[in-house]
Structure formats: structure tokens, C-alpha cells
Image: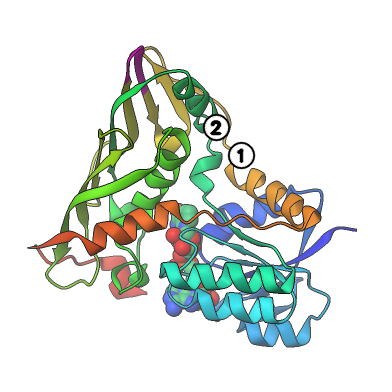
Amino acid sequence: MALKLALVGLGKIARDQHLPAIEATPGARLAAIASRNAGLDGLPSYATIEDLLAAEPEIDAVTLCTPPEGRFGQAMAALGAGKHVMLEKPPGATLAEVEALRRAAEAAGLTVFATWHSREAAAVAPARRWLAEREVRSARIIWREDVRQWHPGQAWIWEPGGLGVFDPGINALSIATAILPGPLAAIRSALYFPANRATPIAAEVDMVMAGGIPVTMELDWRQTGPQSWDILVETDRGSLRLSKGGAELAIDGGAPVAEPDEEYRRLYARFVELIAAGRSDVDLSPLMLVADAFMIGRRHEVEAFHDAAEDRS
Ligand code: NAP
């Protein structure tokens, strides 16, 4: 029988990706929504997850598409009601809360799936295979996008726990930790905070991989014009460029090869598999690197940031 799913937080990513992906997943169907200001015609919709859990005991699993700050309480409520939980990235606002969730799920015999959608981008697995046969010499992550274009009116990204430019940056780290052969550690971090905001608009993070291999990351939300979501890796036998957030792969400067985007379909297929197997999947390594970048980061104050869309919302 198909898994009965409830979705919490009907915002941008829920509408753009989760709804069509659930629709396309044979083993799952959407049965209810919880969102304070939104609902879907023809589906039971509730303002809070507590109302949903009380009214819909038949639900098997809950997907949380709310901002990371506040998700812990929602996830604990779902686990407490015996529901499996799928978490949007980043899996939480802190490391400790995600570890607590993992343990709570384990104790209850439930599945928790901390998703990293960028790891499911088409070129990530081919990149990992190509790198596994080579010696990595250095890597460079360049993630430069226009925050006004991609996050209009999203006040939460500027609040504590919202991660600022690390909200997209953690996608890059989720790919880097999946394709590079050794664990990464942050050794230097510069964080650029707008004078009126609690999270950074830009960052530079230097990391090392086992053996002292340098891995650098440049994040900037002030990029207008062409946008970059690139990872460049130099090896003993050639170079690799992953671009468009993991969608395209180019070897030794050759033409990029692209495949269709199936990131969220793959996530739901995996969630169904994990539940059937009675397993969880919680990899904290991208969130650990972000936490460490904040922990060792040198703070620089930059020009205040104003977003007309935020003022209107
Ligand atoms: P969003 O458009 O702001 O949607 C989040 C929804 O959560 C809101 O519409 C809101 O619906 C609900 N919500 C509950 N508590 C909230 C609070 N305190 N503040 C704001 N909204 C609250 O955000 P999003 O872009 O969909 O991102 C949600 C999560 O998905 C984030 O973790 C983000 O990193 C991740 N993600 C986003 C993207 C993207 O391209 N946007 C891509 C991949 C992953 P109600 O007001 O109806 O409750």
C-alpha cells in the first residue's frame, strides 16, 4: 500500500519540487498539508503539525519543508506520533538537534532521512566515480548567486539559524563531501555580514582534505549577471568541472555533459526504500563544516542589505 505522506511548510521548495516529486513516486501519495498560511484544494490542510497529527492518525510519514529554525520541534512531534520523517536541507539549525532526532528515531524504530538534494544531481555520481580512480591535488568551490533572484522575501535566511549564504553554500558542501575521497576540515573562514543582518551575505572558507590537500570555497550572494555553482578539482590525471550545482560534468576543459534533473524524485524513492528497510540516513558532514566555518570565522561588516520583496511580504 502506498505510503501516506504529509507535507509541512508549503513554500517555494515544497511547490517547485516536492509536490511534483511526490506525484511521480509510485510508493507514496500526499494525504495532508500543514502550513500556517497556505493549503491545497482537495487535501486536508491544517495550520500546524500538531493539528495535523491529531486529526490524521493514518499518516505514515511527514516531510518538513519549513525553514531550519523551528524544524526540531516539528520533527520531534512527528516522531512522537510514530511518523517517519524526511528533512529538507539543512537538516536542522544545530548539530545537536539533528543528532537528538537521529537517536529519537532509532529508539522508536522509525526512519529519519536528512536529505541533501544536490547529491542527487545527475553529474555527482559520475564525478565521484571519476575521482575515485585519481589522486586529488586541489579543489575549488565557487558558489555565486543573486539572493534577490533566488530568495525573494525570505526573511528567515537572514535570522539566526537561517545560515545566510551558507543556505546555498551547504549544497556545495554536500556535493564536495560526497565526491572527494577524504574527509574535509575547515581551517580558516572569513564571514561578511551586512550591517543590518544576523547571517553572512558572503564567505570564504579554506579547508584541507586528508593529506593536506587544499579545498577552498567562495560564496557570494551579491552576484548579478551569470550565476556560478561550480566545483573544480585538479588531479594527478586531469581536471574536473562540476557546474550548475552538480547537473553538468566536464573533464579536462571538454564540453559539459548534462542529464535531466531528477533530484527530488530520487529523494522520495530513497525515502520509500529507507522506510521499507527500517533504516535512517543522517549524514551531518556538510552541516559540521558550516558550523565549523561559523566557529572559526572572522567577522567582517559590509554594506546593509535591503530586499524590496521582503518589505512587501
Ligand atoms: P520558503 O519559501 O520561505 O517556504 C518555507 C515555508 O515554511 C513558508 O512558506 C511557511 O509557510 C513555512 N514556515 C513555517 N515556519 C516558518 C517561519 N518561521 N518562517 C518562514 N516560513 C515558515 O522557504 P523555501 O525556499 O521553500 O525553503 C525551505 C527549506 O527548503 C529550507 O531549509 C531551504 O534551505 C530548503 N531548500 C530551498 C530551496 C529553494 O530553492 N528555495 C532549494 C532546496 C532546499 P506558512 O507561512 O504557510 O507556514
In percent of width and height, residue 43 lies at: 75, 72
Residue 128 colored in magenta in the image:
no
Q: How many marks?
A: 2
In percent of width and height, residue 185 lies at: 30, 47
Q: Nearer the viewer, residue 135 or 79?
A: 135
In percent of width and height, residue 149 lies at: 33, 52
Identified at 29% across, 62% down, the residue is 164
Q: Is residue 157 left or right of residue 66?
A: left
Task: Read off the residue under disc 1.
Answer: 262
How many residues crowd around disc 1 within 10 Å: few (fewer than 14), some, or many (20 or more)?
Answer: some
Image height of 126 relative to 118, above or below = above
Coloured how? rainbow
Task: Read off the residue under disc 2.
Answer: 122
Q: Earlier in the sequence, mark 1 or mark 2?
A: 2
Q: Is residue 66 visible?
A: no
How many residues crowd around disc 2 within 10 Å: few (fewer than 14), some, or many (20 or more)?
Answer: many
Q: Which residues are magenta?
A: 235-240
Q: Is residue 141 visible?
A: yes
Residue 237 colored in magenta in the image:
yes
Q: Outermost residue toward the front?
A: 211
User: What amino acid is labelled 2 in the image?
Assistant: Ala
Identified at 34% across, 34% down, the residue is 230
Q: CA distance from mark 1 to mark 2?
A: 7 Å
Image height of 50 relative to 218, above or below = below
Quadrant position of the N terminus in the picture: bottom right
User: What amino acid is labelled 1 in the image?
Assistant: Glu
Q: Is residue 287 left or right of residue 110?
A: left
Q: Nearer the viewer, residue 252 or 257?
A: 252
